[in-house]
Image (cartoon, grey):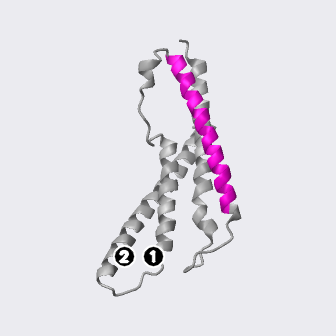
Amino acid sequence: MKEALHMPSIGDLLRVVDKIVFGTLKTIAIVSFFLLTILITANVFVRFVPVVSLHWFDEIIELLFAYMVFYGAAALWITKEHFSVGNWIEKIIPDVRLRRVYRMFLELLVLIFAVIFFYYSLNLTIAARDVTNVFAIPKKVLYACLPISGMVMVVYTIRDIYIEMCTIMKSKT
């Protein structure tokens, strides 16, 4: 018998894309944190033992910190591991379907925030014309983490709204 060829579904493809996007964002955040730790340690050491000048230190720290924060936040956004105030709504709204509607409403508010964040950060990045003082790195490179992470947040918030809508439609009570 011939084995049937398994054609990947769109769901399979999206899961692979999710893993790649999450892995990339997580790696950037972890590497940025690691490099920040090394540079800050080196800067403390050089202050006590002045063997070399780290006049470029501030530029790289600013870049790494921005990348760590924004790409890390986008990675947490994907997995819904970012800060939240808990699931207190179950105590107030006993109806499961009504809780889902409430969650979808919150996701819509989050989407509005994410779209506004993306829009203004994209404008900031596009408008940036100057470069850093020491390495002459275009400020667009520094600011790029803002619209990229904002777009990730928009896309995954739309995903979450879709999931909530499907759950609301499937639930009977």
Residue with the mark numbered 1: 57
Closer-to-camera residue (100/16): 100
**Residue ID at (34%, 87%):** 51
Is 18 located above or below residue 98 in the figure? below
Amino acid under disc 2: Asn
- Asked if marks 1 and 2 touch (Cβ < 8 Å), the reply is yes
Residue type at mark 1: give it: Phe
Q: Residue 81: image x %, image y %?
A: 44, 41
Query: Where does the image place residue 147, in percent across and percent down from the top left?
Result: 62, 54
Q: Quadrant of the N terminus?
A: top right
Asked whether residue 120 is drawn in magenta, I would say yes
Q: Nearer the viewer, residue 90 or 18?
A: 90
User: Compared to 164, does 134 lie above or below?
Assistant: below
Q: Which residues are magenta?
A: 96-125
Q: Position of residue 116 (x, y in %)?
A: 65, 46
Q: Magenta stretch: residue 57 in it?
A: no
Residue 31 disc label: none
Quadrant of the image occupied by residue 131: bottom right
